[in-house]
Image (spheres, helix red, strand yellow):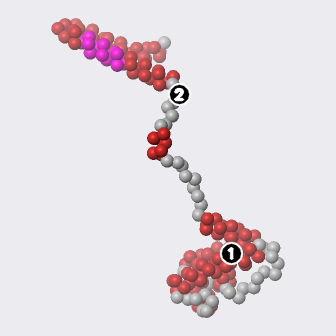
Amino acid sequence: MARAFAIARFPLLLTAMLAIVLIAAPGRSELAVHVYVLIVAALGLGRLLVALRSALPPPRPSAFDAALRGRARAARRIPELERMEREVALGLATAFDFHYRLRPRLRGIAGELLAARRGIELDTSPEAARRALGDDAWEIVRGDREPPRERFDPGVQIDALHLAVTALEKL
């Protein structure tokens, strides 16, 4: 009942306004009836369109719209970053992986940073490189570091690796 009243409220208001116009301006009755019929017809068509739209399934996007949106690309990670993450994980796990996988990578980074930013060669000027890097980072990247005796011993400690990376970042 309340829904029917809500739907009929505006047409009832229009009918009341038509009655007032017909009483107040009887010479304009033909124009008032035409405007009334036009507004009621537009309101009826609007209600019909709403009912029709709710009865039909939602429209599928056209091929043109789909082509404009393009395909969602999966976020691809940088392969070099993935490789570095694996080397860090392995270097933390075993001494062998630290010495033969992660350490050469850190050593290469240290060598390039020292040469480019400080003019120091890692292998030919070890004392200058040690001063520039600090003892923690130098212990990891020094050239005369012995390989591990046991391959499955624990790798580098996370704190030591963090200090070394921080030293490299400060270069």
For the residues marked 2 and 1, what is the alpha-carbon distance in whole angstroms? 58 Å
The secondary element bearing badge 2 is classed as loop
Look at mark 2 in the image and give the residue it sits on. Answer: 57
The quarter of the picture where residue 154 lies is: bottom right
Q: At x 44% / y 23%, what residue is drawn?
A: 50
Cβ atoms at labels 2 and 1 below 8 Å apart: no
What's the magenta region? 32-43
Is residue 26 found left or right of 120 in the rendered image? left
Q: Residue at x 49, y 42 (%)?
A: 66
Q: Residue at x 72, y 72 (%)?
A: 91
- Percent across and percent down for residue 35 are 26, 15
Residue 47 position within the rendered picture, expressed as x and y whole percent measured from the top left? 42, 20
- Disc nearest the viewer among 2 and 1: 2
Q: Which mark is residue 102?
A: 1
Q: In the image, is 167 to the left or to the right of 32?
A: right
Residue at the far front: name it: 63
Tell me where residue 136 appears, x and y as whole percent. Answer: 66, 81
* Secondary structure found at label 1: helix
- Which of 83 and 159 lies nearest the eye of the viewer? 83
Query: Total marks drawn?
Result: 2
Quarter where residue 89 is shown: bottom right
Where, quadrant-wise, is the C terminus in this rendering? Answer: bottom right
Query: Is 42 one of the magenta-colored residues?
Result: yes
Q: Amino acid at mark 2?
A: Pro
